Amino acid sequence: MKNWLNIKNFLDEIGGISNFIARFFQEGFKPRYEFAELIRQCYWVGYKSLPLVGITAFIMGLVLTIQSRPTLVKFGAESMLPMMVSVSLVREISPVITALICAGKVGSGMGAELGSMRVTEQIDAMEVSGTNPFKYLIVTRIIATTLMLPILSNLSNAISLYGGYLGVNIRGNISWHLYWTQVFNAISYSDLLPSVIKTFFFGFAIGVVGCYKGYFSSKGTEGVGRSANSAVVIASLLVFIIDLIAVQIVDLLGLT
Amino acid sequence: MEKESVIEIRNLNKSFGSNHVLTNFEMDLLKGENLAVLGKSGSGKSVLIKCIIGLYFPEQGSIKLFDRDISEFDHYEWDRVRQRIGFLFQSNALYDSMTIRENLEFPLRRHELKHLTDKETENLIIDTLSNVGLEHTIDMMPSELSGGMRKRIALARALILKPEIILYDEPTTGLDPITSREISHLILEVQKKYNTSSIIISHDMSCINIASNRIIMLIEGRCYAQGDYDHLKNMEDEKVKEFFL
């Protein structure tokens, strides 16, 4: 009986999120457009996440380089270090880690903010004020995460590669020019493009889950905490699932 | 001459699952009156005004606002009608991330700011705030204000579009007796100054006594009794008497 209830809840959740996405597309393209709120959300999602994304990216690049060196040295391929690190970072690590950080920071923030707005009747107040709360709160947030994630991911790429440069130079000695030449020789558009495209989907998923959980929050302050928590868990899981699908598609298209 | 009704409710039914909240509920709000709806917690008082403003949809029955059935309203008509109705939420529902100025500007921006210059908007906000005695809070955040001040600001926001009807959802809940009394007198002042018609949802007898002209007792989802404060107070019915003990 309990298992059946779990399955039912799971299917309800899937149905709820699907309806939510359908409503996003329905309302998102109709006027009135909330540009001012969209810019504000882009600022919060993009600019305000930059320090955290930047620090993480820098450490990631540095650590990956330091950790990879011994193995490459074993095979006498130390000179391949910048190439290996750059491909790993650009193709996989940087977009996924950026998305996970945003799922934690932005997804939980949206879940909690919208959840508390729901339980304190602010969303109802908005509706009574003649504002479509879905358009004002949800559409703007989902578009902001969808647009900002690729930008953050690309900045994360650059910062992590800089971390990689410092990592290479801790034990070795490579010039700035040579390092970047090797990096750009290693990376092609077929590495960069799939990585950028998948970050749009990461951003969309984070926005949808964060907003869905917050918008339909219930049971008072306890519900707000739950919304924030489940927004992070589901968004993080979705990032990995989207990544898995993206890898399969890229592989099928022969872009590996 | 009989006064005209601005809200007319007939056979209203609303339930949540198996819980029947409103059953064949009927009432009229006359122009210029303050009508209190009195009932125990969970009796459906808030559901009633949320049905009136379109936040909940009734299952059966009709609600007429300004002589028009709300079931006929589309999105734009709701927009126009809501301009004429102010709503004071139980939790105040002030936008946490906005200053008091922005909180008051929000409904204006949505409805008619296009027609107002910046100076006119500013003057209107200051004027509305001064009506609730809080013009000095204009650049403060809601979190910097006390419960009573937040309630006044929420009332100012409900008043900014100069509505013809105001719906008060538990306007004195969570306030000390002195502030409660102040808010109750403010409700009365608003009625006189703006010539509004209001529905006051409450179980605070002191507020109801001060602010209302007529009372409807909502018991078991129905209009159980109605009349002015003294009339109901002198009734012999046990269920009515309970409220006046």
Image (cartoon, coloured by chain):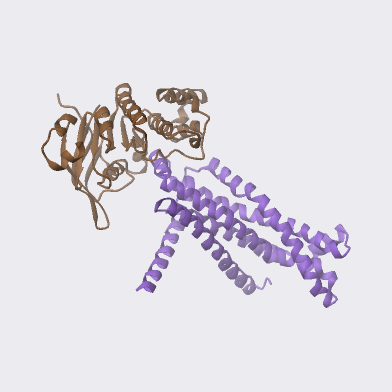
Chain colours: A purple, B brown
x, y percentage for residue B10?
18, 42
* A148 up-or-down from B183: above or below: below
Residue B116 versus residue A212 in the image, above or below: above
Q: Say above or below: B132 vs A240.
A: above
- Place of residue A69 in the rendered image (x, y in percent of width and height, measured from the top left): 80, 70
* Residue B211 in view, yes or no: yes
Query: Residue A122's quadrant in the figure?
Result: top left
Q: What residue is rendered at 54% in x and 64% in y?
A: A238
Picture layout, residue A148 above or below residue B110 = below
Residue at the image point whose x is 28% and y is 31% from the top: B207
Q: Is residue A187 visible?
A: no
Viewer-closest of B195 and B146? B146
* Residue at far bottom of view: A75
Count of numbered badges drawn on the protein: 0
- Depth order, front residue of B56/A119: A119
Which residue is at a point 44% across and 57% down the rendered structure image? A20
Question: Residue A246 sits in which quadrant?
Answer: bottom right
Quadrant where the N terminus of chain B is found in the figure: top left
Q: Position of residue B136 (x, y in %)?
A: 49, 24
